[in-house]
């Protein structure tokens, strides 16, 4: 049986709360949050409720939390970049292992200080360079190590930040100023620099770089532009960086999509950054009227670059050129690795790697097969899970929102809505005979791999407002979106009960 790892989280932003903290709900048998530190009272209180913590385990800063005796096995440092090393060293000295969000620091001396403390106190320090764990880069590393392209001579790579992501995080957002956080090459692209070292297994010997802030400056503002996007800006119609477009009406990023699809947590990004505890259009509009994300992109106090080139020479004369740019419509990373016997081309957003060995037919690797979205390639490993399950007699708790994948791997399925199980049955029974209104709506939306059947299928709509996961109140959490809801549904929480043999549902329709 695995030991339950306890974690104290410093910084409840997107990374600390929505990514690392959320693992408690993905694998509750492996990790539990036992303390939190966050300067914003509203965020702190919401997290206290979410993790079920007593008030004496909730602190206004990492420094305040570190004044207490050791509260967990691991401390997650997800605060601002400039705070990382001091807090991490203090945590190590208290006896914590540390998971530090990237980048560690912009100062090499601080990095060495953290390394020294980890060795002295024999503590583990992990850094959030998560791209190493994707099937995409794992496949590329496997091909290089196998000698498929001979000796690597050069690499070309590009990070496409996208216009709206640049505006959100690096013009209006927390990483807009070098003096407060880190330069763009560290704040955003340290993932890429880490990947080059990891793929090659060699050290960089020489580096040159240039770039700048081309667009997001006052002198580039359209004539008569308002200081805030909701203040009747005359340039609004032709401005792709307009905050109302990005945070309200855009199909990819806007709050209307978040509400319509019932997204929460990290799935609601970037809107969840503006109003983490109230994912409604009214709340987002209010935030845009008064907060930093409603500012004109030409009237912010930003100074980080919006484009940059880095040229590197590694050991053995291997050259790498990397480009980061804000000015793309689609995000993602591309890479081209050139060797003495072949080359590798990869596109992370498409989860595709192409190997061409000179004189041979190119071979394409789809590193996220069998799933509509790919989930960064994680679904590509589901067949391995099934194989191990059968051969070793393993049991998994598999949590996902892609119901075609759930059906593929699961023997028994529980359907959750806002943290409550609403239906539970064998996989075969649930997919053939769904009973709860929410389950029926979910299953009706599964894509059918037949154009004619897909065109003619009936999708059951989910209308109404998504309730607050924090202030749920009495009654069924699905009532605000259920066409069968009565006054009883709004006032009394249904219990999960057996409605057919080994088939359970929590709904007053079965009372």
Image: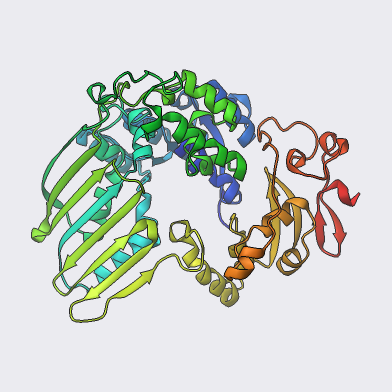
Left or right of 468 on screen, residue 9: left
* Rendering coords of residue 277 (x, y %): 58, 30
Q: Quadrant of the N terminus?
A: bottom right
The residue at 27%/32% (across/down) is 182
At a point 79% along the width and 33% down the height, the residue shown is: 474
Left or right placement of residue 290 versus residue 356 in this view: right
Q: Is residue 291 above or below residue 416?
A: above
x and y, in percent, of residue 362 in the image: 27, 76
Please determine whether, in this image, residue 365 is positioned above or below residue 463. below
The color scheme shown is rainbow
Residue furthest to the bottom in view is 360
- Return the residue nearer the eye: 222 or 346: 222
Relative depth, front residue between 318 and 7: 318
Task: Tell me, yes or no, if residue 59 can be seen here.
Answer: no
Q: Could you tell me residue 259's position as x and y percent?
A: 60, 39
* 381 and 267: which is toward the camera: 267
Kindly identify the residue that appears in the image at 57 percent across and 77 percent down: 391
* Residue located at (86% from left, 65% from top): 501
């Amino acid at each position: 049986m695995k030991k339950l790892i306890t974690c104290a989280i410093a910084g409840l932003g997107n990374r600390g709360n929505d990514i690392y903290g959320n693992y408690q709900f993905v694998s509750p048998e492996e990790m539990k949050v036992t303390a939190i530190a966050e300067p914003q009272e509203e965020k702190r209180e919401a997290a206290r409720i979410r993790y079920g913590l007593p008030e004496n385990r909730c602190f206004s800063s990492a420094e305040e939390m570190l004044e207490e005796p050791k509260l967990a096995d691991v401390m997650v440092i997800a605060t601002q970049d400039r705070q990382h090393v001091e807090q991490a060293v203090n945590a190590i000295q208290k006896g914590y292992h540390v998971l530090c969000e990237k980048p560690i620091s912009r100062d090499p001396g601080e990095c060495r200080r953290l390394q020294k403390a980890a060795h002295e106190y024999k503590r583990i320090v992990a850094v959030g360079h998560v791209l190493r764990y994707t099937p995409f880069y794992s496949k590329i590393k496997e091909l290089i190590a196998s000698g498929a392209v001979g000796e690597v001579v050069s690499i070309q790579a590009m990070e496409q930040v996208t216009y709206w992501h640049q505006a959100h995080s690096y013009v209006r957002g927390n990483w807009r100023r070098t003096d407060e956080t880190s330069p763009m090459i560290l704040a955003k692209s340290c993932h890429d620099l880490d990947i080059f070292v990891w793929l090659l297994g060699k050290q960089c010997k020489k580096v040159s770089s240039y770039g700048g802030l081309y667009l997001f400056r006052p002198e580039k503002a359209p004539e008569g532009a308002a200081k805030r996007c909701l203040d009747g800006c005359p340039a609004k119609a032709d401005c792709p960086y307009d905050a109302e477009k990005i945070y309200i009406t855009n199909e990819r990023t806007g709050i209307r999509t978040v509400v319509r699809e019932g997204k929460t947590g990290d799935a609601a990004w970037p809107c969840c950054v503006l109003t983490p505890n109230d994912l409604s259009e009214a709340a987002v509009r209010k935030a845009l009227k008064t907060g930093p994300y409603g500012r004109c992109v030409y009237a912010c106090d930003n100074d980080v670059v919006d484009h940059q080139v880095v040229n590197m020479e590694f050991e053995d004369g291997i050259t790498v050129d990397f480009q980061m740019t804000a000015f793309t419509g689609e995000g993602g990373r591309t890479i081209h690795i050139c060797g003495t016997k072949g080359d590798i081309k990869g596109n992370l957003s498409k989860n595709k790697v192409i190997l061409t060995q000179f004189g041979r037919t190119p071979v394409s690797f789809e590193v996220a097969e069998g799933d509509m979205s790919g989930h960064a390639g994680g679904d590509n490993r589901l067949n391995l899970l099934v194989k191990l399950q059968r051969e070793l007699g393993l049991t998994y708790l598999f949590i996902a929102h892609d119901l075609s994948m759930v059906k593929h791997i699961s023997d028994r399925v529980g359907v959750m809505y806002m943290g409550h199980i609403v239906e539970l049955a064998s996989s075969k029974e649930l997919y053939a005979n769904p009973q709860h209104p929410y389950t029926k709506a979910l299953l009706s939306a599964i894509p059918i791999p037949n154009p004619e059947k897909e065109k003619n299928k009936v999708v059951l709509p989910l209308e109404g407002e998504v309730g607050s996961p924090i202030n749920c109140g009495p009654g069924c959490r699905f009532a605000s979106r259920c066409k069968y809801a009565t006054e009883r549904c709004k006032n009394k929480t249904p219990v999960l009960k057996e409605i057919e043999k080994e088939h359970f549902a929590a709904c007053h329709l079965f009372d």
